[in-house]
Amino acid sequence: MSTKSVKNTQKNAQAKTQVKAQAKANNELVERLVAINKVSKTVKGGKNLSFAALVVVGDKNGRVGFGKGNAVEVSDAKNKAFEAAKRAMVKVALKEGRTIHHDSFAKFCSAKVYLRSAPAGTGVIAGGPMRAIFECAGINDIVAKSVGTSNPYNMVGATFNALKQLISPKIISERRSKEISDIVKRRNAAVKQNAVKPVAGEASAA
């Protein structure tokens, strides 16, 4: 067998391996269809109808992303959104693999989102698009609240902005050149202090 044929065989084997790895990764991803809208565009000859899909994708291990797709057919719009979501996946820092490390707040357009970490057994207390994001990211215990608009696109954008703000104690310890145990101890002390602090109305009443 010539050297050229050997190289071609190796290239074919590598291509097959990459295809199998890609298929395996796609099978492991969880897909959630958040919203699908019918879009009508008026042109000179009449109206052009198409569909817009919003999809959330995650591996249930801290990686999650969302994407949008437009097409004439619903299935094509979903496929476009799925591919866009895979390319836009981000890593979310999780505490014990079930909840977030700290509370977070973010805005996107007119949507405001509040995220709070929760103890084990709380479950996902959230609705609509936010629940789909948490399920795809593998977050099992969290309390979330959205204020303002109910537009799914804005809610998804605000939720992802809040998730991107999360920082793990490991990253903070590396930035400050301190032990992780010291960072966690100070965080727990601050959380307890905020929990004990009285509300302004209760203090004045007392």
Image (cartoon, rainbow, N blue to C red):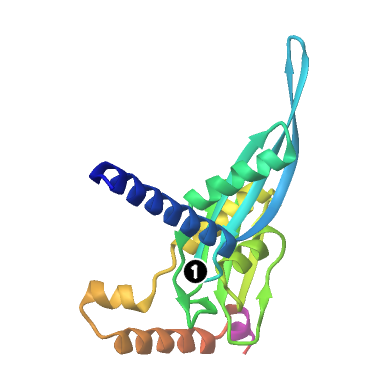
Q: Nearer the viewer, residue 191 or 204?
A: 191
Tell me if 124 is positioned left or right of 162 in this view.
Answer: right
Q: Tell me if residue 9 comes above or below residue 103 in the rendering.
A: above
Q: Label 1 is placed on what type of residue?
A: Gly
Please say if 185 is above or below 175.
Answer: below
Q: Which residue is outermost to the right?
A: 46
Image-quadrant location for residue 181 = bottom left
Quadrant in which the C terminus appears: bottom right
Residue 154 in the image: state x and y as whole percent. Answer: 61, 49
The reply to whether the magenta stretch includes residue 182 is no
Side of 152 relative to 24 (left or right): right
Can you give x and y, in whole percent of width and height, for residue 42 in the image? 74, 18
Residue interval drawn in magenta: 201-205
Q: Residues within 10 Å of mark 1 (few under 14, many from 20)?
A: many
Quick check: 141 above or below 120? above
Residue tagged by mark 1? 62
Numbered disc total: 1
Could you say which is closer to the camera, residue 204 or residue 75?
75
Q: Is residue 198 visible?
A: yes
142 left or right, relative to 2: right
The main secondary structure of the magenta stretch is helix
Q: Position of residue 149 (x, y in %)?
A: 68, 50
What secondary structure is marked by label 1?
A: loop
Q: Residue furthest front?
A: 1
Res. 101 visible in picture: no
